[in-house]
C-alpha cells in the first residue's frame, strides 16, 4: 500500500483550455450512400454465389435422370 494514486490538480485558468468542443468531421451523404451501395453489392454477390454453388451441389448429388447400372 505504499503506491498511492496520482491526482492531477487542474487550476481554474487551465480548465478553460479543456472546455473546447471536439469537432467531429461528418462525411458527405454522397460518400455514405456510396459505401452503403458498395456493401449491398458485396452482399448480393455473395448470396448469388452461394445459390449457384448450392444448386450445383444438389444437381451433383441428385441428378435429374437416374443413372443406370448397366455393367
Image: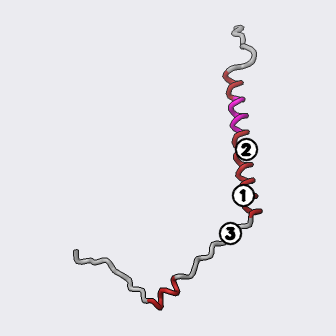
**Which residue is disc 2 drawn over?**
44
For disc 3, the neighbor class at 10 Å (few under 14, some 14 to 19, many from 20) is: few
Q: In the displayed structure, would residue 53 be above or below residue 62?
A: below
Magenta-drawn segment: 49-56
- Foreground label between 2 and 3: 3
* Mark 1 and mark 3: Cα distance apart in space: 14 Å
Q: In the displayed structure, would residue 42 be above or below residue 50?
A: below
9 vs 4, nearest the viewer: 9
* Quadrant holding the C terminus: top right
In the image, 56: left or right of 23?
right
**Which residue is disc 1 drawn over?**
35
Q: Residue at x 42, y 86 (%)?
A: 10
Q: Quadrant of residue 6?
A: bottom left
- Give the mark nearest the N terminus, 1 or 2: 1
Label 2 sits on a secondary structure element that is helix
Q: Position of residue 62 (x, y in %)?
A: 68, 20
Residue 55 is labelled as: none
Examine the structure image and report whether residue 27 is included in the region drawn in magenta: no
Q: How is the image coloured?
A: secondary structure
Total marks shown come to: 3
**Which residue is disc 3 drawn over?**
26
40 vs 66, nearest the viewer: 40
For disc 1, the neighbor class at 10 Å (few under 14, some 14 to 19, many from 20) is: few
Q: Quadrant of residue 24?
A: bottom right
Amino acid at each position: 500500500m505504499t503506491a498511492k494514486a496520482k491526482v492531477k490538480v487542474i487550476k481554474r485558468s487551465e480548465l478553460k483550455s479543456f472546455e473546447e468542443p471536439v469537432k467531429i468531421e461528418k462525411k458527405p451523404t454522397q460518400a455514405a450512400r456510396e459505401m452503403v451501395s458498395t456493401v449491398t453489392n458485396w452482399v448480393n454477390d455473395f448470396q448469388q454465389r452461394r445459390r449457384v454453388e448450392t444448386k450445383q451441389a444438389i444437381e451433383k448429388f441428385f441428378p435429374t435422370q437416374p443413372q443406370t447400372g448397366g455393367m
